[in-house]
């Protein structure tokens, strides 16, 4: 949600943002509804004031024995008019709120304009591995080493599910433990959020209409399975005023993630790259507005360091206006090299959402008790999505004899050097 005052004062800037994002949105209707709701607020306030004044007059008339019936009849008419106006006002507010919740965030000036072809490579790290044998993908490697059960998972749960087996289970847990240790050393607070949240919380985190094909809804309950721990983390301080002196508040959130992957049929359908459930450690930061861009750069730098320690070649890409999510003002993707696919693939998304989510959830802060409150900035970044990262490890560190070398930094967690 954007500051409506900013929209009223800078409508042409908002129109340009919508054009740059290639998003269809009825800005004129939003401005019209905003004007109407403000007029109705004034009208209902005036009627309430008039009703209160008449109530006082009626009370005084009764005390003095004066004729009160005409006043009572007039107040009844005012009450009826007020009730009708309040009903229309409620409908207007509902229509306004629904529309206001779907407008995308503003864009940072550094975001390139265009579709995914306009994405900008920022930097690259590592050397692409060279092999003197035929390179296998993670599916073939896993089948040869009995690390995955895909067909039995499909029988049990359907497509895009899996059983991790043997050392792949240990590798998964090793990535999680290393990730938590890594962020703990960076001063992050550990968190394991709820895996289900209610509609109000989910609407605060995402544009729900856009996510209906992505997230799972629990039938007959006001609960959704989280698609990422960001959804639960941002909602944690809903309707609260935080102490500005405690900011930035940095969290390392670990959770499973559940996604329908609707519309992704035929793409990465086999294996564990694109699946309905996976584990992820998320960086989530609540920041003062003046610090949020530094926090954004710090978060992507931390993620880069993590993958460098895993010895996985990667590059950082700045997403274009037409390729990024609507709630983000700026997003970096980190793409890692996957030898079995002979390509870089996205494994990390790092976004600054400014005050877009905090306005939806009413999360504010102040430095001193007598100061006005301000909306907080929220930022999120994957540290590691373990299934996708394991794909990169299996494919990049495979050996000629069909085994897989374990990254040095994970060997102490695995208790071995090779799978």
Image (tube, rainbow, N blue to C red):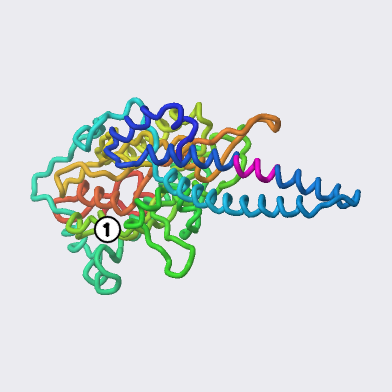
The verdict on residue 413 being magenta is no
- As drawn, which residue projects farthest toward the right? 64
Observer-nearest of 57 and 287: 57
Element carrying mark 1:
loop
- From this viewpoint, which residue is outermost toward the bottom? 155
Callout 1 crowding tier (Cα within 10 Å): few <14, some 14–19, many ≥20: few
- Across and down, in percent, residue 31 comes to 43, 37
Q: Is residue 68 left or right of residue 23?
A: right
Write the residue at 86% across / 47% down.
60
- Judge from the rendering whether residue 249 lies leftward or rightward of residue 311; answer left or right: right
Q: Position of residue 316 (x, y in %)?
A: 28, 34
User: What residue range appears in magenta?
Assistant: 43-49
Residue 342: where, in percent of width, then height?
A: 14, 44
Q: Which quadrant would the N terminus be assigned to in this image?
A: top left
Residue labelled with disc 1? 262
Seen in the picture, residue 75 relative to 160 is either above or below; the reply is above
**Horizontal arrangement in the rendering, residue 257 relative to residue 52 (left or right):** left
Residue positioned 22% across, 36% down in the render: 115
Q: Kindly report the secondary structure that dominates the magenta region of the rendered protein.
A: helix
In depth, the one of 122 and 323 nearer the eye is: 323
Residue 47 falls within the magenta-colored stretch = yes
Asked if residue 114 shows in the view, the reply is: yes
Q: Residue at point 75% right, 53% down?
A: 72
Q: Nearer the viewer, residue 368 or 322?
A: 322
């Amino acid at each position: 949600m954007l500051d409506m005052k900013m929209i009223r004062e800078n409508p042409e800037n908002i129109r340009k943002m919508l054009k740059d994002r290639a998003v269809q949105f009825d800005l004129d209707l939003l401005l019209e509804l905003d004007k109407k709701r403000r007029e109705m607020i004034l009208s209902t306030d005036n009627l309430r004031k008039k009703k209160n004044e008449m109530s006082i007059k009626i009370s005084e008339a009764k005390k003095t024995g004066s004729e009160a019936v005409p006043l009572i009849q007039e107040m009844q008419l005012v009450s009826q008019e007020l009730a009708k106006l309040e009903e229309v006002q409620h409908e207007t507010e509902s229509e306004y709120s629904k529309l206001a919740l779907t407008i995308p965030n503003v864009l940072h000036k550094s975001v390139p304009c265009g579709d995914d072809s306009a994405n900008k490579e920022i930097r690259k790290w590592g050397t692409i591995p060279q092999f003197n044998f035929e390179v296998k993908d993670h599916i073939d490697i896993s089948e040869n080493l009995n690390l995955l059960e895909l067909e039995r998972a499909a029988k049990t749960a359907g497509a895009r599910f899996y059983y991790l087996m043997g050392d792949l289970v240990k590798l998964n847990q090793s990535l999680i433990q290393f990730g938590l240790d890594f962020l703990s050393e960076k001063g992050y607070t550990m968190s394991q959020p709820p895996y289900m949240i209610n509609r109000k919380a989910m609407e605060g985190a995402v544009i729900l209409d856009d996510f209906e094909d992505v997230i799972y809804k629990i039938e007959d309950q006001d609960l959704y399975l989280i698609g990422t721990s960001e959804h639960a983390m941002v909602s944690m301080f809903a309707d609260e005023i935080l102490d500005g002196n405690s900011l930035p508040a940095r969290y390392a959130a670990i959770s499973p993630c559940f996604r329908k992957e609707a519309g992704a049929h035929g793409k990465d359908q086999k294996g564990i790259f694109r699946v309905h459930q996976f584990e992820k450690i998320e960086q989530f930061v609540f920041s003062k507005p003046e610090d949020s861009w530094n926090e954004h750069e710090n978060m992507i730098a931390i993620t880069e360091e993590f993958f460098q320690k895993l010895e996985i070649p990667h590059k950082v890409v700045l997403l274009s206006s037409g390729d990024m999510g609507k709630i983000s003002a700026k997003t970096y993707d980190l793409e890692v090299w996957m030898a079995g696919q002979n390509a870089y693939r996205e494994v990390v998304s790092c976004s600054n959402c400014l005050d877009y989510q905090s306005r939806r959830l009413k999360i504010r802060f102040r430095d001193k008790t007598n100061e006005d409150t301000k909306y907080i900035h929220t930022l999120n970044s994957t540290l590691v999505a373990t299934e996708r990262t394991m794909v990169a490890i299996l494919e990049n560190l495979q050996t000629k004899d069909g085994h897989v070398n374990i990254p040095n930094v994970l060997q102490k967690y695995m208790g071995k050097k090779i799978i």
